[in-house]
Image (cartoon, rainbow, N blue to C red):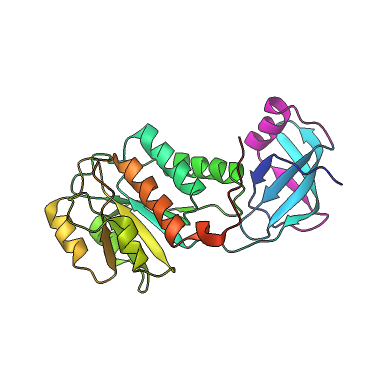
Amino acid sequence: MAFEPRTRLYVADDLAAGESVALDASQAHYLKTVLRLERGSPVALFNGRDGEWRALIESFGKGTCAVTLDGRTREQVSEPDLWLAFAPVKRARIDFLVEKATELGVSALQPVLTERTQVERVNLERLRANVREAAEQTERLTLPEVREPLPLQRAIDLWPAGRRLLLCDESGRSADIASALHAEQPGAWGVLTGPEGGFTERELDALRNLPFVCAIGLGPRVLRADTAALAALAVFQALLGDWRRGDGARRRG
């Protein structure tokens, strides 16, 4: 039986049997200098379209690495249509948030600027790098889309018809998340969380009145903004998402 590679890399190239793919300089450095792989060593590639492929290292150059595709190891499958709209938080916490949201299966990350948002700039390239690394580590076949920040009202104005929105309401006036979701159906959903300090009453009142919004509470304790987002995603995946498939978690240390 052929050895299955544990090292996974995302590439933008089309993937097909026998094709050669040129990896970028950071990937070449990682394989050669960090992992100390050699010519003939196997790696796995995915691009979000063509499934996952086994590839063999063909050669290393100065800041380059060429690999040849040996065969497909996993077919492309559909992944959850679950968005996360979140008020940006400080650097270390936003890095943690997007990494873990990727692990939890979100398909899009939408920063939203609320009345109490304190973070004015979002480094999208750093977030995309975090997303890519998390997807490589967790055996996802796609990368979540990382979108440009939008004012909250603009994000709501652009919200697609037919997509429900789970509003994390820290006021204590909404039903608990488990009770609320038991009355809902799977489908296209998003989760919305506010900044440190929470939404303003004006924002909460406006959001609760929208017909596609399901406002929920997250228990008796005050949660940090990033904790609230991840808690809501985990419960959603358990009750309405792809944790219900019954095939168990794939764990990697």
- Relative image position of residue 230 (x, y in whole percent): 39, 46
Compared with 38, 18 (above or below) is below
Direction from residue 86 to residue 143 in the image, left or right: right
- Name the foreground residue: 252 vs 248: 248
Q: Residue furthest bottom?
A: 162
Residue visible at 72% across and 46% down? Answer: 44
- Relative image position of residue 160 (x, y in whole percent): 36, 70
Is 50 inside the magenta-drawn segment?
no
Residue visible at 34% across and 57% down? Answer: 178
Compared with 198, 38 (above or below) is above
- Relative image position of residue 13 (x, y in whole percent): 67, 54
Is 38 inside the magenta-drawn segment?
yes
| Image quadrant in which the C terminus is located | top right
Direction from residue 158 to residue 96 in the image, left or right: right
- Name the foreground residue: 187 vs 235: 235
Compared with 145, 119 (above or below) is above
Q: Residue furthest left?
A: 202
Residue interval drawn in magenta:
15-39
Residue 73, image quadrant:
bottom right
- Relative image position of residue 16 (x, y in whole percent): 77, 58
- Name the foreground residue: 114 vs 64: 114
Q: How many labels does the image show?
A: 0
- Name the foreground residue: 217 vs 166: 217
